[in-house]
Image (cartoon, grey):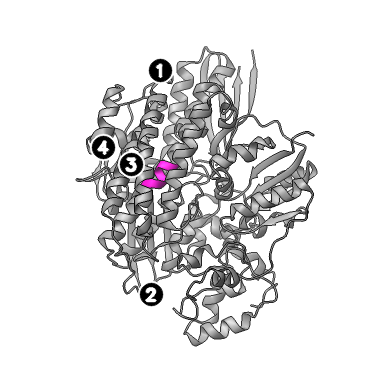
Amino acid sequence: MGKRVVSEYIARVEGQGRLEVEIENDRLKDLRLQIFEPPRFFEAFLVGRKYWEVHEIAARICGICPVAHVITALRAVEKALKIHVSEDTILWRKVLADSAIVQSHALHVYLLAAPDFLGYHSALEMADKFKNEVVRGLRMKRVANTITKWVGGRVIHPMAAVVGGFTRPPDLREKKRILDMLKNAEKDAVATIEMVASFEYPDFEVDYEFVAIRNKDSYAINRGRIVSNKGLNIEEDEYRKFIGERQVPYSSTKHSYVKGRGPFMVGPLARFNLNFDRLKGEARDKAEEIGFKPIVRNPFKSTIARSIEMYHLILEMEELIERGGEDVKVGKVRGGRGEGTAVTEAPRGLLYHAYTLGKFGEVVKADIVPPTAHNYFRIEEDLRKQVSEIIDEEEEEIKRRCEMLVRAYDPCISCSAHFLEITLRRR
Amino acid sequence: MDKPKIGVFKFTGCAGCQMAIIHLEERLLDIFGGVEIRYFKMATSRNPGGPYDISLIEGSVSTPKEIKEIKEIRKNSRYLVALGTCAVYGGVQAMRNPFKEIDVEKKVYEKPEYIMSLESKGIDEYVDVDGYIYGCPINVEEAVFLIKSLLLGFQPYYPEYSVCVECKMKGNECLLLKRGEKCIGPITRGGCDAICTTNKFPCQGCRGPLYGTNIDGLFQKLSKMGIDREEVINIMRKYVNEVYLRGEVAR
């Protein structure tokens, strides 16, 4: 019996992708996650641009996580030019990154993922019955965005962070108001954890290689060693020695893998599992209270990891903002030859930028790997396993579960795709 | 009266301009409460489709598939609005336009034969456009104003002056004259509330050129500061390369 099921485009993900599943005689025959987001060729047109505008252009890779691209590009360029930045610059960049992650997570938890668990098409439709929840999500987003704007000048493509420091420090007269807002947001963060803990998650586990950055004194976001639960422990400069990339014929995104092993997972669940001991005490306690402890191997539960991270990052921002000063002035900066690599944690996971600069500080070579590219191979393997496990289910259920699984990774497909269309063929 | 039907579409871009709409936060519920969302992939999985009273297009057209899609949306829309610099001019990815396609693809992908893309263009290269919202990213207040105007049947009014006017009204110190920075605010379309220069970052021209400004005067001023013409043109081309490639502004 031949059967063919085509679903409409999956919504509530950022990117154009298409999933094709072929089932023959109750066995999975073929599965392809095709990303057909039109490629934009950043690595090509960055060539020839000047060192001072690299981060500004790189921000445009993604309208959801521009902050991560800005900070990563700045660090890579600063390394290439051997520029050292002040303690305050490092601190405010951390606040900037933290606020952007909270914003992105609030968006994902409330607007993209929650409708799956509560049985709606969108948060807007949810708003009738779950008004408090939706408003809470939007409020958390607003608090986070207020901070991004305060430090970075704008939420989307912030311009105040530049090579060597900031164009100006944040207006410290606002400190108290911002701290009060964060204090209030703690309650929302706890309520979020309780809400997502009450959702029902599909039974599904994978023995992942989790990859994230880690450092001694804090939950690593902007800098750290690259580590995994399967023995990876390297400097960011060694990234290319250990992480490979290959093109797949049906997609504009490449497959990443740990050399000699295979696919890996990056993102909130990887960070949570590898850096649980670096979370703020209150966030760690809350995680334990709801029975959420490493190692969590269920990708659907990334949503819980996001909510724990939001609580942690809100607490961390309070502490950082409390001691942040105004010493962010850019010193003498001159363009010249050099090479620099930086790896950070974007909301969706490991982000890699590397640049080679020429005589005048112009880009000679650019190499960028966003988190969704890191996860892409892994998502495909997960889908294979998931489909095999529920192969007897109705087409609709298989489709729903696959969509949910893709969404659990919160793919940011402008960093690679825009809608996800699923085709399921059963023979 | 039926609620006006709105579609939000993404083409080649970063999703930042539709994020600007989502970032309206609590206001989002008010504004979207007054309209019927017929298509907004990023926000909802219920997308019944056209016809639309207003279609907001984010991103540039850069593949044969997108040419077909934009024409289809045009047919189904009463008003078609280009939302942001990608949709208006082609965006930063238009920097690649003068390169040979295959060279660009080789730089990023080892096997470019699998990838198919065209030059990155603004949507009015292929269809008629009723409204333009400039900026990378947009100033979302301009988008809200445009939607309200179209719905109420008013011709929306957008000031025709350069970034300098708003920058001066803010009382900012001039980055070009006082600090010697490469600011092209004098020749760039205003309406952004001078957000970059107010944050002490020189204007990079993301909203495109304002016609009739004294470009030669800017070249002369910058050249006295030791910044050559080629470098200034490179800045001008960053967001709106097509405009310069078409020779609409003095090279």
Can residue A129 be found in the magenta stretch?
no
Q: Are marks 1 and 4 on the same chain?
A: yes
Using the image, name the chain to which the residue with label 3 belongs: A
Q: Residue A385 placed where, x, y %?
A: 43, 23
Q: Are marks 3 and 4 in contact (CB under 8 Å)?
A: no
Q: Residue tagged by mark 4? A: A279
Identify the residue at horizontal 53%, vertical 28% (top origin).
Answer: A131
Label 2, label 4: how far apart the Cα atoms are: 43 Å
Instruction: Give the overall secondary structure of the magenta segment.
Output: helix
Label located before the other in sequence (3 or 2): 3
Q: Are marks 3 and 2 on the same chain?
A: yes
**Image position, residue B8 (x, y; %):** 66, 42
Query: From mark 2 to mark 1, how far is it between C-alphas?
Result: 56 Å
Residue A311 quadrant:
top left
| Disc 3 to disc 4, C-alpha distance | 9 Å
Of callouts 3 and 4, which one flags the residue occurring earlier in the amino acid sequence? 4
Membership of A100 in magenta stretch: yes
Looking at the image, residue A60 sits to the left or right of residue A188; the answer is right
Judging by the rendered image, the residue that carries numbered circle 1 is A203
Q: Is residue A410 above or below residue B165?
A: above
The amino acid sitting under disc 2 is Lys
Disc 1 secondary structure class: loop
Q: Amino acid at mark 3?
A: Leu
Q: Label 4 marks which chain's residue?
A: A
Q: Secondary structure at mark 4?
A: loop
What residue sits right under mark 2 in the picture?
A359
What kind of residue is marked 1? Answer: Asp
Q: Earlier in the sequence, mark 1 or mark 3?
A: 1
Res A60 visible: yes
| Residue identifier under label 3 | A313
Residue at x-position 70% and y-position 48%: B147
